[in-house]
Amino acid sequence: MRKGLFLIVCFLLPILTPTAVAWNPDGFLSQEIIGGERLRLGDEFGCHGIPGKDIRSDTEAISECRDYLMSQINASKWGDAPLSFGLPEGDIGADVEQVLLGNGFRIVGDQSDTDRNSLIWNLNRSGGSLEKNVASITEIEAAVEENGFVNMYWEAEIGDLNVRRDRDVLNWIETQPFWFTTWGEWYSSTHPVEEVDRTNRTVILKGTAARLGAWDVPGNSIVHLSSGTITSIERIDGGSLTELTSDERHLMEGYRLLDNNSVAITVNEGANIQITWSGDDADVEIIEGTFNNLTPFMAVGHHTIDLFEWSSPFMESPLRFTWLIEPKPEVGDSWILPLLAIVIAIVAPMAIYHTINQEKKDREKAAS
């Protein structure tokens, strides 16, 4: 009886033993042909957590996702470490924010109504989805009017459903005066120039450093004179400064005259710029601006587990994406199973032989 139970247990163990969950890396993420191309274009890679784990109850999922991402690809052409994290729906507490900050994340979004503050930005969803029959030009225009930026949602697969982009809305987006940027790029560019010297007809400005924890990205400024007409804008430190047109919609150093006495300037830390004007002495106002004085437009790939599927509809598009990456779970056999197979292969024949032999002896004993 005991031998029979032993055999039953041996054969049932492989069935009853739980399988181990491993992560199946996204090959397109680390490959030069897809991940590398998106990186060079200016896309950003952030985190969307770990499947089955809620960061509000398991904050280790934050560092786990970060480590997974950094083992596959850099976060941006501007910096290696990720800055952006996709929040679960609902509010997060101050303790979770501290863990996010401790792991280098400075931007979160986009299903919370929490306003961004000095420690961590919260970029609310704004403008809807890029999905066909869901995308709305009216909703995008309302987002610009209400928030001054667009932060659209994209997910290529929802359950078993393959999602298609709305070509008509996408074509319209590509013609608008938008700065195609990402969460981390916009956050890192929010450091305007500062005034270092001036006369009655010139002012010298200097590019400042990006905020703590941000990438080393050129900063955006709007410089406005109270009177006079700008006659020249030049670097006086030996560097060059490109005059931009309104068609330039991806972040780069340069300037664009907005009118006779206003200019949008984007420069790196330490760049020295001199603005000269004609006319009387003027007051100089410097404010934080956006690149080329355009409206920031961000497209966000949610729960990105297959970069090829998520990005292929936008191969020829000027849009730049913030890809919120999460690992794809793969159920694989536990290491216990091969070990059990070996044990069973050795023990089962011995047990069967012993049982048969014992039964033979019992029959012979009964016959005598």
Image: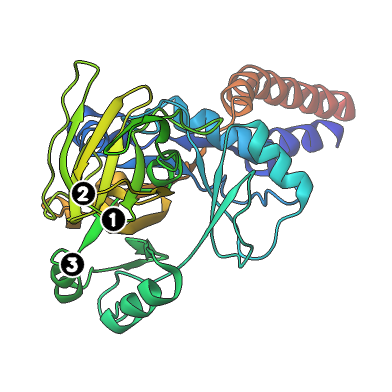
Amino acid, disc 2: Gly
Reading the image, the residue beneath label 3 is: 176
Residue depicted at 63% across the width and 46% down the height:
118
| In-image side of 286 versus 96 (left or right) | left
Q: Secondary structure at mark 2?
A: loop
Q: Which mark is residue 258?
A: none
Is residue 176 visible in the rendered image? The answer is yes
Reading the image, the residue beneath label 1 is: 227
Q: How is the image coloured?
A: rainbow
Mark 3 crowd level (few <14, some 14–19, many ≥20, 10 Å Cα): few
| In-image side of 122 versus 365 (left or right) | left
Reading the image, the residue beneath label 2 is: 279
Amino acid, disc 1: Ser
Query: Do the CB atoms of the residues marked 1 and 2 lie less than 8 Å apart?
Result: yes
Mark 1 crowd level (few <14, some 14–19, many ≥20, 10 Å Cα): some
Vertical order, 282 against 131 (above or below):
above
Q: Secondary structure at mark 1?
A: loop
Residue depicted at 61% across the width and 61% down the height:
115
Q: Tell me which label, 3 or 1, sits earlier in the chain.
A: 3
Q: CA distance from mark 3 to mark 2?
A: 35 Å
Q: Quick one: 189 or 281, which is closer to the camera?
A: 281
Query: Do the CB atoms of the residues marked 3 and 1 lie less than 8 Å apart?
Result: no
Q: Quadrant of the N terminus?
A: top right
Amino acid, disc 3: Gln
In the image, residue 156 lies at what x, y percent? 32, 60
Is residue 18 visible in the rendered image? The answer is no
Q: Secondary structure at mark 3?
A: loop
Residue depicted at 61% across the width and 46% down the height:
120
In the image, residue 53 lies at what x, y percent? 65, 49
